[in-house]
Amino acid sequence: MVCINCQSKTEVINSRLQKKSNRVWRRRFCPQCKNTFTTIEAFHDLSFIVSDTKLPKTSPKPFSRDNLFISLYLSCGHRNNPISDATALTDTVVGMLLPSIQNGCIAKSDLLATAQSVLEHFDLVAATHYKAYYSKSL
Ligand SMILES: [Zn+2]
């Protein structure tokens, strides 16, 4: 990666795997202008299907990170910074879902249960809201 100031080649001076969100955090240094900045390496095209096993006649739908984010954001509406909370929660839920994907598919019940579980460990009011609005099919 090149420097954001001078476009010279940069060096990685620190790197950490963020297991929960399956991302790699890197601190970069530019020897030319002495600038430092942070990058995050993450999945870009994360595509999989969400199937609803309780309603087998409904067609599978593509996973939507945006829909997950919105559901978590609305559940965190009472908090001081719901956008950053929902962003971090979305990363956590997606990271936890990755091992459950089989043949490019995940059960809707697994998605909802994972989001519910993450919220229960984060904020019980948000978890209660999520359960009332999104976990009806559990
Ligand atoms: Zn530079």
Image (tube, rainbow, N blue to C red):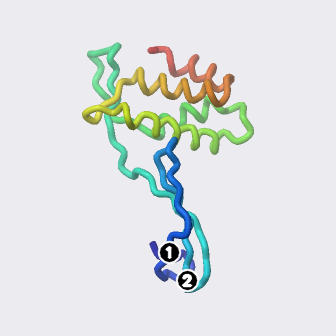
Q: Position of residue 106 (x, y in %)?
A: 34, 29
- Residue lying farthest bottom? 32
CA separation in Å, label 2 and label 1: 8 Å
Q: How many marks?
A: 2
Question: Residue at the location (65% across, 26% down)?
Answer: 126
Question: Residue at the location (54% across, 35% down)?
Answer: 70
Mark 2 neighbour density, 10 Å: few (under 14) some (14–19) many (20 or more): few
86 and 57: which is toward the camera: 86
Q: Secondary structure at mark 2?
A: loop
Q: Position of residue 11 (x, y in %)?
A: 50, 74
Which label sits on residue 31?
2
> The disc labelled 1 sits on which kind of residue?
Glu
Q: Do the residues under discs 2 and 1 have CB atoms within 8 angstroms?
A: yes
17 and 6: which is toward the camera: 17
In which quadrant of the rendered image does the N terminus lie? bottom left
In primary-sequence order, the first of circles 2 and 1 is: 1
Quarter of the rendering containing residue 110: top left
Ligand 1 falls in quadrant: bottom right
Question: Residue at the location (70% across, 42% down)?
Answer: 81
Mark 1 neighbour density, 10 Å: few (under 14) some (14–19) many (20 or more): some
Q: Is residue 137 above or below residue 63?
A: above
Q: Position of residue 44 (x, y in %)?
A: 39, 52
104 and 27: which is toward the camera: 27
Ligand 1 closer than 8 Å to label 2 CB = yes
Q: Relative to 114, is 106 on the left or the right?
A: left
Which label sits on residue 11?
1
> The disc labelled 2 sits on which kind of residue?
Pro
Q: Is residue 22 above or below residue 71?
A: below
